[in-house]
């Protein structure tokens, strides 16, 4: 009797489920102990896997951490790909891109992974480098490539322009959220900052930039929602 091809092997969906469970468990351990104090033995025990199985897929602890970050940022970049659609007005595309970015940066798990990378960067510089490569840099390059071929974009440096837009969106707002673990950005605050970033960006990089508002109109713009006063230490 001929053996059925693949008999005895787990289905692809089962393997994928095991990998997801392993990455979920590893994420919990890294966030609990930090990168330097995490050991593969604890991850294996909590995930119900063997160290040999883990090392067969991820040869080093750095490779495992990179896989975690890649999974997290990969989902965001998939949503970017759906947003960066040719033929749409540049302002609308940037608005969608920026909102997705700030929503992601508001997620505690991604913020925590970023904090781990920064905290361990002195001892493990390759960790922060990998985080940059698979996360912010890849997102910036996606936007760069989109700007380079968009008919509304003006200027010969789409990479610099992409960096500027990301900086406008992720300025002190995101820095503050990183420093204050309990801080959350409400949806209306996210939209306010993104719309301001889009307005400023288009004024410099769009061939069809809107007319500059009068001084009186600029002074009448309302303050961002939930923005604390200067004396508010929170």
Image (tube, rainbow, N blue to C red):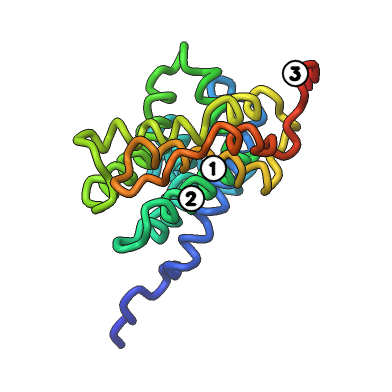
For marks 3 and 2, the one nearer the N-term is 2
Which residue is found at the position 40% from the left and 61% from the top? Answer: 82
Quadrant of the rendered image containing residue 175: top right
Classed neighbour count for the residue bearing mark 2: other residues with Cα under 10 Å, few (<14), some (14–19), many (≥20):
some
Classed neighbour count for the residue bearing mark 1: other residues with Cα under 10 Å, few (<14), some (14–19), many (≥20):
many
Report the quarter where the N terminus lies.
bottom left
Whole-percent x and y of residue 60? Answer: 40, 32
The Cα atoms of the two marked residues, 3 and 2, are separated by: 28 Å
Q: Is residue 222 above or below residue 175?
A: below
Classed neighbour count for the residue bearing mark 3: other residues with Cα under 10 Å, few (<14), some (14–19), many (≥20):
few
Residue tagged 3:
230
For marks 3 and 1, the one nearer the N-term is 1
The Cα atoms of the two marked residues, 3 and 1, are separated by: 22 Å
Quadrant of the rendered image containing residue 204: top left
Q: Nearer the viewer, residue 197 or 4?
A: 197
Q: Nearer the viewer, residue 185 or 193?
A: 193
Q: Nearer the viewer, residue 78 or 39?
A: 78
Which residue is found at the position 60% from the left and 47% from the top? Answer: 191
Is residue 42 something one can see in this rendering?
Answer: no
| In contact (CB < 8 Å): disc 2 and disc 1 | yes
Whole-percent x and y of residue 20? Answer: 53, 54
| Dot 3: element | loop
| Dot 1: element | helix
Residue tagged 2:
95
Residue tagged 1:
194
Which residue is found at the position 46% from the left and 44% from the top? Answer: 73
Which residue is found at the position 39% from the left and 75% from the top? Answer: 7
The Cα atoms of the two marked residues, 2 and 1, are separated by: 6 Å
Whole-percent x and y of residue 86? Answer: 30, 61
Whole-percent x and y of residue 160? Answer: 29, 31
């Amino acid at each position: 009797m001929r053996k059925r091809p693949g008999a005895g092997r787990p289905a692809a969906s089962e393997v994928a489920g095991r990998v997801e469970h392993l990455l979920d468990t590893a994420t919990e351990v890294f966030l609990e102990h930090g990168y330097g104090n995490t050991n593969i033995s604890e991850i294996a025990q909590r995930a119900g896997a063997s160290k040999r199985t883990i090392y067969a897929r991820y040869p080093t602890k750095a490779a495992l951490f990179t896989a975690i970050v890649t999974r997290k940022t990969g989902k965001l970049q998939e949503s970017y790909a759906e947003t960066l659609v040719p033929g749409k007005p540049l302002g609308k595309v940037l608005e969608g891109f920026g909102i997705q970015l700030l929503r992601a940066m508001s997620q505690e798990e991604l913020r925590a992974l970023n904090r781990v990378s920064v905290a361990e960067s002195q001892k493990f510089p390759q960790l922060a480098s990998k985080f940059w490569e698979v996360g912010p840099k890849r997102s910036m390059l996606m936007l760069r490539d989109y700007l380079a071929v968009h008919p509304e974009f003006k200027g010969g440096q789409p990479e610099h322009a992409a960096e500027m837009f990301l900086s406008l969106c992720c300025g002190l707002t995101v820095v503050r959220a990183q420093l204050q673990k309990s801080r959350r950005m409400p949806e209306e605050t996210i939209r306010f900052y993104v719309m301001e970033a889009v307005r400023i960006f288009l004024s410099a990089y769009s061939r069809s930039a809107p007319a500059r508002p009068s001084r009186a109109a600029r002074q009448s713009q309302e303050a961002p929602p939930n923005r604390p006063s200067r004396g508010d230490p929170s």
